[in-house]
Image: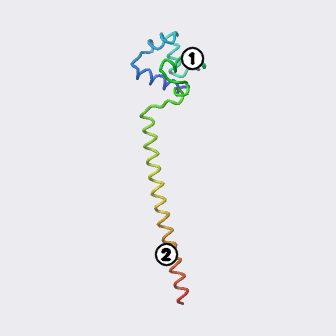
Amino acid sequence: MKSLGKKIRLLRHQKGWSQEDVAKRLDISIPAFSKIETGITDINLSRLEQISNLFEMSVVQLLTFNDHEQEQKFVNELDVVNKKLTDRETEIIELQKKVIELFEELRHNKATA
């Protein structure tokens, strides 16, 4: 739930709203909303729908929402891993070529011996 709370806090900051603003819109106390953001309180489905409507998104969008910086970090990490994989594939191809060349050389040497 802490992850969801962080998402809600991020969305609240993006809107420029205080905890008090959101608490009033949700018709709950500020401490109750604070517990949602910190992950102390579990959110029931009706509250989740209320929060998603407040931020003009579906419940699925709210649950799967990611911080752009975090997404970019994952994309960058994926790029690095893909580059390493491509480099390894190139290395394997070069090694395969060397094995074929050595095999051909051995076969040639046996034929001439």
- Across and down, in percent, residue 91 comes to 47, 62
| Amino acid of disc 2 | Glu
* Residue at which label 2 appears: 101
Circle nearer the N terminus (2, 1): 1
Disc on res. 47: 1
> Farthest bottom residue?
113
Rendered location of residue 53, percent (x, y): 51, 19
Q: Label 2, secondary structure: give it.
A: helix
| Residue at (42% x, 43% y) in the render | 76
- Quadrant containing the C terminus in the rendered view: bottom right
Residue 8, compared with residue 20, is above or below; it is below
- Residue at left 45%, top 57%? 87
**Labelled disc at residue 16:** none
Residue 81 position within the rendered picture, expressed as x and y whole percent measured from the top left = 47, 49
Residue 75 percent across, percent down from the top left: 45, 42
Which amino acid does the dot numbered 1 rest on? Arg
